[in-house]
Image: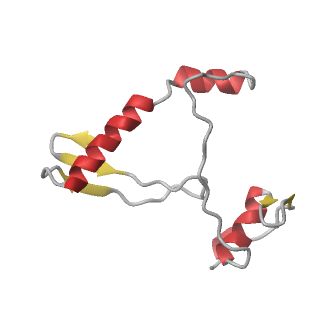
Amino acid sequence: MIFDNDIFMYPYAYQVLGNISFILHLRNDGSEKARFFISNAKRIHRDAVPAREVIAARANRRFYSDKWIAAAVYIVPEASDPLYKFGSPILGYDIWQQKSVEAETQDIANVRA
């Protein structure tokens, strides 16, 4: 969000448990960093999808918009990484073994990496 010379960014983590994140506050001082965040906000606003399209997609699973770009970039930890061992059962898939995995019953609040 940009208000006058104040830039606020909420860097949420996608598909994680909970909704706790910090807020970054920058001042538009004309620096390269400030210009980056302002141009990034403009790109996000330009490419935003209207809510009616999101609702239509949920109502009709065959919904498609020619405005969408089908692309994704994933960073996958090594199979031995504690985050990977924790996350695979939650997502229900083990990418390294290329197979579905059963969700484990675990007390998520007490898991430590």
Look at 34% across and 43% down and name the residue there. Answer: 40
Percent of width and height locating residue 4: 16, 40
Percent of width and height locating residue 76: 65, 64
57 left or right, relative to 99: left
Look at 48% across and 59% down and name the residue there. Answer: 20
Residue 13 against residue 86 in the figure, above or below: above
Q: Among all residues in the image, which is located at the extreme left?
A: 29
Report how many numbered discs are placed on residues in the image.
0
Residue 15 against residue 51 in the figure, above or below: below
103 left or right, relative to 72: right
Whether residue 107 appears in this view of the structure is: no
Q: Quadrant of residue 77?
A: bottom right
Look at 29% across and 48% down and name the residue there. Answer: 37
Q: How is the image coloured?
A: secondary structure
Quadrant of the frame with the C terminus: bottom right
34 left or right, relative to 96: left
Quadrant of the frame with the N terminus: top left
Whether residue 38 appears in this view of the structure is: yes
Percent of width and height locating residue 75: 60, 62
